Image (spheres, coloured by chain):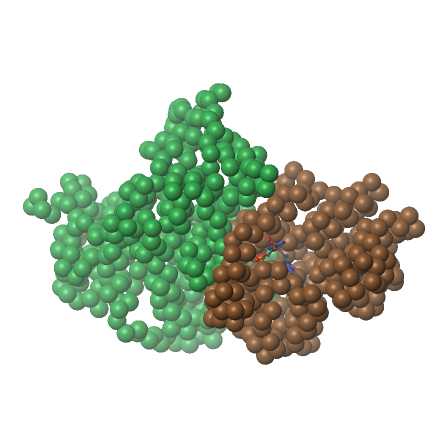
Amino acid sequence: MSALKRTRMAMPVQDPERRRSNFSEVALGYTAEMAKEEASRCLDCKNPKCVSGCPVGVDIPGFIKAIVADDMSSAIEVLMRKNNLPAICGRVCPQESQCEAQCILGIKGEPVAIGRLERYTADWNLKQPAKTWTAETVSHKRVAVVGAGPAGLTAAADLAKRGHDVTVFEALHAPGGVLMYGIPEFRLPKAIVQKEIDMIKSLGVKIEVNAVIGKSSSVDELLDDGFDAVFIGTGAGLPNFMGIDGENLNGIYAANEFLTRTNLMKAYDVNYHTPIKIGKRVAVIGAGNVAMDAARTALRLGAEESYIVYRRSEAEMPARHEEIEHAAEEGVKFLLLNSPIAYEGDAAGNLNQMILQRYELGEADASGRRKPIAIHGDTVTMPIDTVVVAIGQGPNPLVPQSTSGLDLTPKGNIVADENTGQTSRPGVFAGGDIVTGAATVILAMGAGKKSAEAIDAFLSNLSSL
Amino acid sequence: MYKITEKKNLGNQIIQIDVHAPSIASKALAGQFIIVRQDEFAERIPLTIADYNREKGTITLVFQAVGFSTQALMTLSEGNTILDVVGPLGMPTEIEQYGTVVCIGGGVGIAPVYPIAKALKAAGNRVIAIIGARNEELLFLEKEMASVSDVCYIATDDGSVGVKGFVTDLLQEVIQKESIDHLWAIGPMVMMKAVSETTRPFNIKTTVSLNPIMVDGTGMCGGCRVQIGTDTKFACVDGPEFDGHLVDFDLAMRRAAVYKEDEKKAVEQHECKCGGAGLCQH
Ligand SMILES: Cc1cc2nc3c(=O)[nH]c(=O)nc-3n(C[C@H](O)[C@H](O)[C@H](O)COP(=O)(O)OP(=O)(O)OC[C@H]3O[C@@H](n4cnc5c(N)ncnc54)[C@H](O)[C@@H]3O)c2cc1C
Ligand SMILES: Cc1cc2nc3c(=O)[nH]c(=O)nc-3n(C[C@H](O)[C@H](O)[C@H](O)COP(=O)(O)OP(=O)(O)OC[C@H]3O[C@@H](n4cnc5c(N)ncnc54)[C@H](O)[C@@H]3O)c2cc1C
Ligand code: SF4
Ligand code: SF4
Ligand code: FES
């Protein structure tokens, strides 16, 4: 292997100084030349390890080979056999712990930049005239999909391709789930999400927005109304709070609210009327992807200082590597081994300071990470205008509580078979974050795919009865 | 798209509209609300379902034009459409046969208390209604309230109709005369707080309907959180009705004012740009 090929083609990015004050995409994407050069690094392994690292089993050497051969229509065709939303996965998959983690080139150098090539292929496709699909057979079976996040959209697309009549019910006014309301524009442009959704609609999938299942109607009613099966993909949309003093002061947001106001409601654009309050000094509690997104969003909304406040150390931060790096480049500051124990505000109820408890690291805990231990008496007061709480989320209870005969875990997640999504209720399937707890886009899509297959089998059993 | 089938001006910037939304109308129950997004650029704002007509497939909304979004909504006419309406949201009122109940509506709060009074009456309760406003001009739905209650008292600040004073003054009198099994109060936060303080010494079960700032209305964003006793609750899914004796009203009032400055600016900027809320594109 030549030395040249040990390192991957760098991704062109917007300059940090510029990008920290705009919402345009940070990573700019490969040119055709860059993509071909990077693609030619792939060894086209006989037994490709990378594929085993991809939760949906994309034929990685297959699509990469097509890029090298300048045959982009085959590249996209191979890619989309397993992945309905490649422009999205190419951007947000945690590749370093999935496909790229397994790539053989990673042993002696840098793995093939699979994600970037996937993005390149998908973006090429989005520039082509939209293809129209027609299902080979029409089954006359009706499937209701609850929630238009990656799990629901994938299940819907696969079921439509198999000829079923699919309606997706979405609580918000726009489909997309976290892709639309959570992940910021600068990491995943909404126009791309919209194009992928349009593609799914072109398969004949109907999407009903403003439909809150559990309120507007229930899973039981959908089944009574003539749907033959239901897939539940309602996500993990219930924000956790710490339950500490002052947490309800003005200026303290759950990450979901902060990001929804900015992304879905476009609070950063003066033409849109949803307000957001951003102070000079912003602290984001937590260090996952959600926290990085919030801290970087705060800078773009005009905060002078944006902090990540995390009770462990750098090594334990759960966010994607690239996100942490991008955040640091943009000027996000990291306040590690610290966590708030109380917030204080002025007479009008506006947050103005927080009390931080200092931590040190002890022995490794069950998760293998060193456990943070509070240093007794070591607290400090920090002036702060805005706080974003990003310490994880639980399952939204609207659907679980309103559906009869559905087994739940103690945390309130729906119990579903790992391979089929089958729940305790015949004809009702579930997948994505509502089953696994907050996870990843690709895992949610994988669950949607498996369920689509199982639902298809369930429906053909119905017709043979 | 949801069409406005009827529009009435109730005076004092209070508007009543009927909106064609058959699936919401078929499900709506007293105490629930919807969220509207007028157009692509608008905020999502919650409004109580003041009435519904399942046959016609319409819901009735009554709102006061207090800021940018409600002023823009006011500019719509019969035949115009609203881009998004979602609901019914929130927990419905627990309608039972309690015995003697009191329903208090203050200002624009008369609208949301009306369907509750109506449902309680239909469930066989003796309903005592108390409605209040600053003056006669600002009073509305008084006939409707009278038609669903056994007694209907009116209070105005200036005495232009009914008794001169506050709804709490009338409530004091009712408490002396009657044994009350349950009470609902909807109106400005200060009114609901005053009513809750009035009933507290008498241990009268008091339900109030909170109206914090909301975004999604499904329990996803946490923006609508309110303090009920020692618990933090999400008003959109756990409420909007709560035990008035446990509500932290002062906190709720402070939280409702969080965007006050920004909203004032929005209205001012808007007025200088196009000469009236909602007349321009945005
Ligand atoms: C800020 C943020 C950043 C993230 N970054 C990454 C990343 O970089 N990479 C990655 O892989 N993952 C990331 N994730 C995680 C990833 O987005 C989720 O794991 C994934 O979206 C889960 O998909 P889902 O389809 O299960 O649910 P969701 O995407 O949550 O979609 C659920 C949908 O169901 C709707 N819904 C809920 N209740 C109802 C109801 N009662 N009726 C009708 N509809 C309902 C919701 O409105 C929503 O649209 C991130 C998450 C967040 C919040
Ligand atoms: C469950 C629920 C039901 C509601 N039902 C009705 C109804 O039936 N009729 C009606 O007129 N209003 C109702 N409201 C309140 C209504 O949503 C607000 O008046 C509206 O959002 C204000 O928007 P705006 O842009 O016009 O005003 P803004 O410019 O946002 O606000 C103007 C002023 O009102 C205050 N304010 C803003 N939002 C609220 C709020 N939610 N509660 C209290 N004060 C607020 C602001 O601090 C400001 O001083 C309800 C609210 C909730 C949560
Ligand atoms: S879908 Fe994700 S994990 Fe699979 S190949 Fe693409 S980037 Fe890698
Ligand atoms: S493991 Fe790496 S080199 Fe081998 S096929 Fe996969 S991407 Fe190519
Ligand atoms: S409005 Fe978002 S949680 Fe209630």
Q: In which quarter of the image is residue B78?
A: bottom right
Please report the residue visible at 86 percent of the width from the left and 48 percent of the height from the top: B172
Residue A185 position in % (x across, y down): 36, 56
**Residue ranking furthest to the left:** A2
Left or right of residue A371: residue A406: right
Q: Which chain is brown?
A: B
Residue A47 position in % (x across, y down): 20, 51
* Residue A37 versus residue A223 in the image, above or below: above
**Nearer the observer, A40 or A123:** A123
**Nearer the observer, A163 or A310:** A310
Residue B103 position in % (x across, y down): 79, 57
Residue A425 position in % (x across, y down): 55, 57
Q: In which quarter of the image is residue B249?
A: top right
Q: Which chain is green?
A: A
Is residue A279 something one can see in this rendering?
A: yes
Q: How many labels does the image show?
A: 0
Is residue A404 something one can see in this rendering?
A: no
**Residue ranking furthest to the bottom:** B79
Q: Quadrant of ligand 2?
A: bottom right
* Residue B49 versus residue A343 in the image, above or below: below
Q: Quadrant of the N terminus of chain A?
A: top left
**Nearer the observer, A398 or A426:** A398
